[in-house]
């Protein structure tokens, strides 16, 4: 297919370029962070507690209060040991009191928005440890989102499967 001056690239080409760029970024991030998952940072933006942008390590995020849970992971179809900070605690520690929603973005630009009623209704865990260990990009880290009380028999949880997120790089308080 010839591209005519002034025309945009075909959709498949834009998608291929994005995928290739994402894979290259993932490769270089993995090289830079391999074996040092605790040193990776998550960017906090928007209505933070002081209005500034912060790049926090997962250890700093854990200062909001770590909980340990065994959670049924519907993608692996087994119970997995996770540790991390419940979303309501994350918002309480690092967000401004006026925060009503948060947008969480992954390295591949996948984004999920949670509103306050959701983190008040469900125990949503911002995972910082997998099976007792910090984890890097090679294991879909440095952080993930899981629903602690996930029950595959309940429709409400099945509808929230797209909200399970990994390779988190940014949390925007809104």
Image: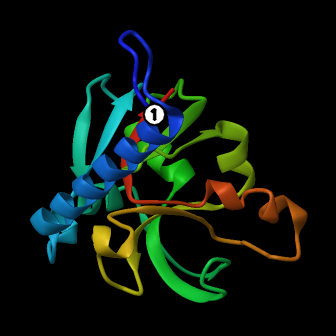
Where 159 sits versus 103, above or below? Answer: below
Give me the residue at 54% from left, 28% from top: 99
Is residue 16 or residue 172 the one in the foreground?
Answer: 16
Looking at the picture, how far across and down is residue 48, in whole percent? 37, 30
User: Residue 59 sits in which quadrant?
Assistant: bottom left
Residue lying farthest to the front in this orientation: 2
Residue lying farthest to the bottom in this orientation: 78
Looking at the picture, how far across and down is residue 143, in whole percent? 39, 62
Number of marks drawn:
1
Q: Is residue 57 something one can see in this rendering?
A: no
Is residue 90 or residue 32 the one in the foreground?
Answer: 32
Looking at the picture, how far across and down is residue 25, in whole percent? 24, 53
Q: Is residue 4 something one can see in this rendering?
A: yes
> For this view, does 78 lie left or right of residue 86?
right
Circle 1 sits on which residue? Answer: 1
Give me the residue at 29% from left, 76% from top: 134
> For this view, does 107 lie left or right of residue 87?
left
Colouring used for the render:
rainbow
Give me the residue at 50% from left, 46% from top: 110
Where 79 sits versus 106, above or below? Answer: below
What quarter of the picture does the N terminus occupy?
A: top left
Count neighbours of disc 1 (C-alpha within 10 A) and say few if under 14, some if 14 to 19, many if 20 or more.
Answer: few
> For this view, does 136 lie left or right of residue 33?
right
Where 2 sits versus 7, above or below? Answer: below
Where 113 sits versus 2, above or below? Answer: below
């Amino acid at each position: 297919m010839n591209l005519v001056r002034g025309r945009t690239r075909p959709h498949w080409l834009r998608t291929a370029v994005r995928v290739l760029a994402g894979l290259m970024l993932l490769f270089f991030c993995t090289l830079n962070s391999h074996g040092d998952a605790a040193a990776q940072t998550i960017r906090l933006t928007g209505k933070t507690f002081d209005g500034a942008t912060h790049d926090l390590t997962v250890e700093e995020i854990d200062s909001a209060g770590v909980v340990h849970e065994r959670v049924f992971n519907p993608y692996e179809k087994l119970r997995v040991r996770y540790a991390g900070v419940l979303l309501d605690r994350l918002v309480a520690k690092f967000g401004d009191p006026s925060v009503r929603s948060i947008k969480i973005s992954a390295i591949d630009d996948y984004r999920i928005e949670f509103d306050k009623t959701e983190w008040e209704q469900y125990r949503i865990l911002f995972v910082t440890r997998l099976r007792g260990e910090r984890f890097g990009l090679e294991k879909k880290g440095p952080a993930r989102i899981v629903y602690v009380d996930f029950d595959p028999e309940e429709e409400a949880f099945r509808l929230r499967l797209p909200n399970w997120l990994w390779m988190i790089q940014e949390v925007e308080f809104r």
